[in-house]
């Protein structure tokens, strides 16, 4: 994806035998173990940013394609500008979205742990919102060791 600073997916592996029983899966990245991977996605000049059905489908499909377990989706429509805020709650964390259709902009977070690939969810966002520009900031959160 253009304009992204993410580590190659080949560098991300799920913590295996070293995991302690009863703990969530950790991600191993560059010699450390992390609670999860957090993508901050800025969508510019996007389409469908006030279409609640498209947003709902994008969150659901983004979770599925990422390999995450969807628990619940909650969306709220703002009548004054057509913006929508919402969250897909995942067993592995969340995907959240806040749209400003009047600016053609959306801010999306994909935060996941375990055997997931949030970058696949970001690709679903690209398909759903057809942005003129998509920027991704990639973070590994919660260094455990």
Image: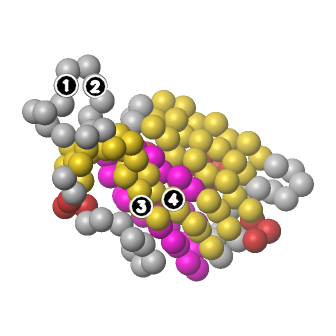
Is 136 displayed left or right of 96 in the figure? left
First reached walking from the N terminus: tag 2 or tag 4: 2
Quick check: 35 above or below 107? above
Mark 4 vs 3, N-terminal side? 4
- Where's residue 35, x and y in %? 35, 40
Image quarter where the C terminus lies is top left
CA separation in Å, label 3 and label 2: 24 Å
Q: Quadrant of the N terminus?
A: bottom left
Label 1, on which residue?
20
Q: Is residue 127 magenta?
A: yes
Q: Position of residue 113 (x, y in %)?
A: 35, 41
Q: Give the secondary structure at mark 3.
A: strand
Residue at coordinates 30% horizontally, 38% vertically from top-left?
Answer: 144
At a point 22% along the width and 57% down the height, the residue shown is: 30
The magenta segment is 108-136
Contact, mark 4 vs mark 3 (Cβ under 8 Å): no
Compared across the picture, whether 2 is left or right of 117 comes to right
- The reply to whether callout 1 and callout 2 are in contact (CB within 8 Å) is yes
| Residue underneath mark 4 | 40
Task: Please determine whether, in this image, residue 34 is positioned above or below residue 130.
Answer: above
Q: Secondary structure at mark 1?
A: loop
Say which residue label 2 marks: 23
Decide: few, some or many residues near mark 2? Use Cα within 10 Å; few <14, some 14-19, many ≥20.
few
């Amino acid at each position: 994806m253009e304009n992204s600073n993410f580590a190659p997916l080949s560098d991300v592996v799920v913590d295996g035998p070293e995991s302690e029983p009863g703990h969530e899966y950790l991600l191993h990245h560059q010699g450390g173990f992390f609670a999860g991977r957090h993508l901050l996605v800025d969508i510019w000049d996007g389409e469908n940013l006030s279409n609640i059905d498209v947003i709902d489908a994008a969150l659901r499909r983004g979770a599925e394609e990422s390999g995450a377990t969807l628990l619940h989706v909650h969306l709220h429509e703002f009548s004054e500008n057509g913006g929508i805020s919402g969250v897909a709650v995942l067993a592995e964390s969340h995907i959240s979205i806040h749209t400003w259709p009047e600016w053609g902009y959306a801010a999306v977070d994909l935060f996941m742990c375990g055997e997931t690939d949030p970058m696949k969810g970001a690709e679903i966002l690209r398909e759903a919102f057809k942005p003129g520009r998509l920027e991704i900031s990639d973070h590994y959160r919660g260094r455990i060791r």
